[in-house]
Image (cartoon, rainbow, N blue to C red):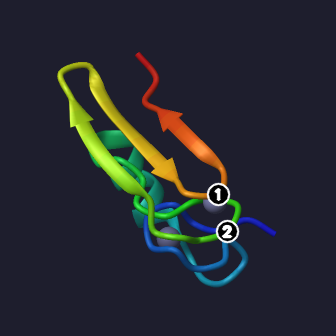
Amino acid sequence: MTYCSFCGKEEADGDHAFCRQRLSAIDPPRYCRECARRMVVQVTPDGWTARCSRHGQTVSRP
Ligand SMILES: [Zn+2]
Ligand SMILES: [Zn+2]
């Protein structure tokens, strides 16, 4: 099971088209896809990094 990294709900639960739109635009993810924990997000000059205390760091694609 995966979770929406924008709103933190289950991917299967509801329509996340808006979430994906936001994520692909400018917003970093807020929730871990694997456990829905709130991630620690840092905006960097190149983009962002988001860290889950359990699953480690995700970095924005260049
Ligand atoms: Zn969502
Ligand atoms: Zn996680």
- Disc 2 residue crowd, few under 14, some 14–19, many 20+, Cα 10 Å: some
Q: On the rendering, which quadrant does ligand 2 occupy?
A: bottom right
In percent of the image, x 32 and y 34: which residue is there?
48
Q: Which residue position holds label 1?
A: 54
Q: Is residue 62 positioned above or below 44 on the image?
A: above
Locate residue 37: give its quadrant: bottom right
- Disc 1 residue crowd, few under 14, some 14–19, many 20+, Cα 10 Å: few
In percent of the image, x 42 and y 53: which residue is there?
29
34 or 62: nearer the eye? 34
Amino acid identity at mark 2: Cys
- Residue 3 on image: x %, y %: 64, 68
Mark 1 close to ligand 2, CB under 8 Å? yes
Locate residue 52: give its quadrant: bottom right
Residue 53 as seen in the image, left or right of residue 12: left
Q: Which residue position holds label 2?
A: 35
Q: Can you name the residue that lies furthest to the left here?
A: 45
Separation of residues labelled 1 and 2 (CA atoms): 8 Å
Q: Can you name the residue that lies furthest to the front here?
A: 53
Mark sitting on residue 24:
none
Q: Secondary structure at mark 1?
A: loop
In the rendered image, the quadrant that contains the N terminus is bottom right
- Residue 8 on image: x %, y %: 52, 74
19 or 44: nearer the eye? 44
Mark 2 close to ligand 2, CB under 8 Å? yes
Which of the two labelled residues, at mark 1 and mark 2, occupies the earlier sequence position?
Answer: 2
Circle 1/circle 2 CB separation < 8 Å: yes
Q: Nearer the viewer, mark 1 or mark 2?
A: 1
